């Protein structure tokens, strides 16, 4: 790989590192800048009954992009022709694409006048290009926008995005999956591994996995009363107070 190739790949490497974090949107828009000039980048996951924002970034007008995207997922996404085509109940059940697709916004301005005014004219958006990717129970729409100053996407722009469609869909899927996976707070993880004694950790783990004080006692050669004592010490050190929290913690720790 020559230095030029490495320079092209590096921004997307940063996207992979940022997947699942709040920095993903900014990393993605910076990487996409090497492919096509854009003003906003948004990932929205459309589910059967609602939609949610997965990532959002903007070059200059993040506040505007955030407000529009919140209105979009708040219900206006149902007016989007691309959503109607790819994420309606019938499409998800029968005609949903197996592979990612790239589509321009083909909007009938007369029949969608209010939508067009709200999401294009008022915020100064000239064009929208979306990578649509199926997911488990949702459809991901990775959309990039150009401002009126930039003008519409050219055929070359669309071809460049299409060339990266599979990769972009995989990035969006990875980010969504990691974002949905709860993480153990760093300070709790440190306490689990350093503040607890070996016996306290063993008792807490077994109780968190659903064992009773009696069965844990039999497994560790302890009386049930001693098991309860070790449990109380462990919970105090971890800063948690309920059995439910202990179950959730042990599930995350594996």
Image (spheres, rainbow, N blue to C red):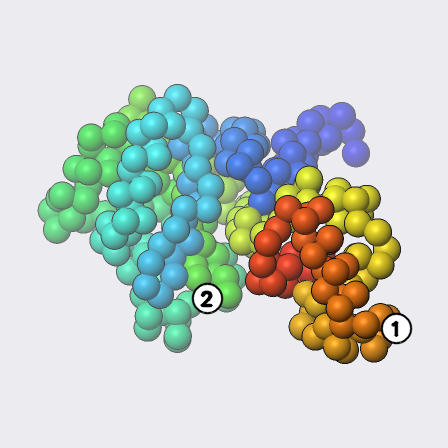
For the C terminus, give its image quadrant. Answer: bottom right
Tell me the residue at 84%/70% (across/down): 222
Which of the two labelled residues, at mark 1 and mark 2, occupies the earlier sequence position? 2
- 3D distance between C-alphas at marks 1 and 2: 46 Å
Instruction: Tell me: residue 56, above or below residue 180.
Output: above
Q: Identify the residue under disc 1.
A: 221
Q: Position of residue 146 (x, y in %)?
A: 36, 31
Marker disc for residue 47 = none
**Image quadrant where residue 214 sits:** bottom right
Q: Nearer the viewer, residue 66 or 201?
A: 201
Tell me the residue at 26%/43% (across/down): 71
Q: Position of residue 236 (x, y in %)?
A: 68, 49
Q: Position of residue 221 (x, y in %)?
A: 88, 73
Q: Secondary structure at mark 2?
A: loop
Bin the neighbour count of mark 1 within 10 Å (Cα to Cα): few under 14, some 14-19, many 20 and up. Answer: few
Residue at the front extreme? 225
Q: Identify the residue under disc 2.
A: 137
- The reply to whether residue 94 is visible in this rendering is yes
Give the foreground label among 1 and 2: 1
Q: Nearer the viewer, residue 115 or 48?
A: 48
Tell me: 69 left or right of 4. left
Tell me: 108 left or right of 182. left
Q: Mark 1 and mark 2 in contact? Answer it, CB < 8 Å.
A: no
Q: Nearer the viewer, residue 48 or 213?
A: 213
- The reply to whether residue 97 is visible in this rendering is no
Q: Secondary structure at mark 1?
A: loop
**Image quadrant where residue 251 sits:** bottom right
Q: Position of residue 70 (x, y in %)?
A: 31, 42
For the N terminus, give its image quadrant. Answer: top right
Instruction: Tell me: residue 143, above or below residue 96.
Output: above
């Amino acid at each position: 790989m020559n230095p030029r190739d490495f320079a092209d790949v590096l921004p997307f490497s940063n996207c992979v590192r940022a997947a699942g974090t709040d920095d993903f949107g900014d990393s993605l828009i910076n990487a996409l800048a090497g492919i096509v000039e854009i003003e906003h980048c948004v990932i929205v996951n459309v589910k059967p009954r609602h939609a949610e924002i997965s990532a959002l970034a903007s070059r200059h007008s993040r506040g505007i992009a955030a407000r529009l995207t919140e209105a979009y997922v708040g219900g206006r996404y149902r007016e989007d022709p691309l959503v109607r085509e790819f994420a309606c109940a019938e499409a998800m059940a029968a005609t949903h694409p197996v592979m990612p697709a790239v589509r321009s916004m083909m909007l009938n301005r007369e029949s969608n006048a209010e939508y067009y005014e709200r999401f294009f004219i008022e915020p100064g958006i000239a064009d929208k290009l979306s990578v649509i990717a199926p997911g488990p129970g949702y459809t991901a729409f990775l959309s990039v926008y150009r401002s009126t100053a930039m003008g519409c996407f050219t055929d070359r722009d669309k071809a460049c995005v299409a060339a990266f469609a599979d990769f972009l869909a995989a990035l969006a899927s990875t980010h969504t999956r990691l974002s949905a996976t709860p993480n153990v707070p760093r300070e709790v993880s440190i306490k689990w591994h350093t503040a607890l004694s070996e016996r306290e950790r063993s008792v807490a783990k077994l109780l968190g996995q659903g064992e009773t004080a009696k069965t844990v006692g039999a497994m560790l050669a302890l009386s049930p009363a001693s098991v309860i004592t070790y449990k109380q010490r462990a919970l105090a050190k971890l800063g948690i107070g309920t059995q439910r929290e202990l179950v959730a913690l042990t599930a995350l720790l594996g």
